[in-house]
């Protein structure tokens, strides 16, 4: 999934002409389905081993479903940042939220225990520069030993298959979810393809900044946890 084509220009919540990507994103899953999905992912990534009072920031947090998942898993010191005021305005929960660019985080050095990104890095406009900036910011704000958790699309055989199905007009008519997925892909095609086409470079940058704790590349996703040295 992606970012509004120009997040800073995202249509306001009451706009009669909503951003098509945001409209598809909001209809892809219900918030409840998204929260359940994030809870499952976080458990797979080892969240049960993380301290419940860890200071956690979710980057590219969108409407905050990841924050709800963290809250339900018992984490108490949570916050989210995103570039879209419209998506942030959808969040109703106990975490702090802030509108900012993840390439320039408004947090002091070594001030957070865990940073999480779920489906945000592949929206960065320019690789490798924007990814280098974002990873440097994450490294800066994490405490030594802090965790960087990443869930992003990854070009596995399963994802290639999903792409073929999502382009099929009959499949799109039969499944609103596939249709929403294809609309999102079409609106984010440049950054999405840029991301999927540079897996070695992306992996090299992650590996250079963090010590790998978890790494799974399956079912079209990279599921990664790295520790800051
Ligand atoms: C696909 S959404 C993912 C949202 C959430 N993580 C999820 O999975 O539901 C990508 C988000 O990245 C945000 N975004 C894009 N570029 C950003 C940037 N440079 N800094 C902060 N947020 C950004 C968009 O506003 C959007 O909410």
Image: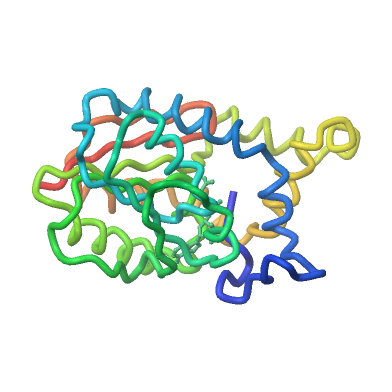
Q: Is residue 210 above or below residue 30?
A: below
Instruction: Please give the name of the residue rendered at 60% of the width and 64% of the height, measured from the top-left corner.
Output: 86
Report the side of 31 relative to 143 (left or right).
right
Q: Position of residue 52 (x, y in %)?
A: 23, 33
Residue at 62% over, 76% down = 9
Q: Nearer the viewer, residue 106 or 52?
A: 52
Q: Tell me residue 75's x, y (percent).
A: 30, 36
Q: Is residue 162 above or below residue 196?
A: above
Which residue in the rendered view is the most extreme toward the bottom?
Answer: 9
In this picture the colour scheme is rainbow
Q: Is residue 86 left or right of residue 148?
A: right
Q: Position of residue 28 (x, y in %)?
A: 69, 41
| Total numbered labels | 0
Q: In the image, is residue 27 above or below residue 107?
A: above
The residue depicted at 67 percent of the width and 57 percent of the height is 22
Left or right position of 84 against 116: right
In this rendering, the answer to whether 122 lies above or below 224 is below
Residue closer to the observer: 70 or 123: 70
Which residue sits at x=68%, y=33%?
162
Quarter where residue 6 is shown = bottom right
């Amino acid at each position: 999934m992606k970012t509004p084509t120009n997040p800073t220009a995202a249509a306001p919540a009451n706009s009669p002409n909503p951003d098509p990507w945001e409209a598809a994103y909001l209809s892809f899953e219900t918030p409840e389905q998204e929260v359940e999905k994030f809870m499952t992912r976080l458990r797979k990534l080892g969240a049960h081993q993380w301290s419940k009072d860890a200071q956690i920031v979710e980057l590219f947090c969108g409407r905050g479903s990841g924050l709800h998942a963290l809250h339900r898993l018992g984490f108490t010191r949570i916050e989210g940042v995103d570039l879209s005021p419209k998506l942030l305005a959808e969040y109703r929960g106990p975490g702090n939220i802030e509108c900012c660019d993840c390439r320039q985080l408004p947090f002091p050095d070594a001030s957070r225990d865990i940073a999480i990104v779920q489906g945000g890095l592949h929206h960065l406009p320019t690789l490798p520069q924007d990814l280098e900036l974002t990873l440097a910011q994450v490294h800066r704000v994490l405490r030594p030993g802090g965790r960087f958790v990443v869930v992003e699309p990854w070009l596995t055989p399963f994802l290639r298959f999903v792409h073929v199905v999502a382009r099929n007009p009959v499949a799109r008519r039969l499944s609103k979810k596939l249709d929403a997925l294809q609309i999102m892909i079409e609106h984010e095609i440049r950054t999405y393809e840029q991301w999927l086409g540079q897996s070695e470079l992306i992996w090299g940058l992650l590996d250079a900044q963090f010590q790998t704790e978890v790494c799974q590349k399956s079912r079209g996703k990279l599921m990664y946890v790295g520790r800051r040295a």
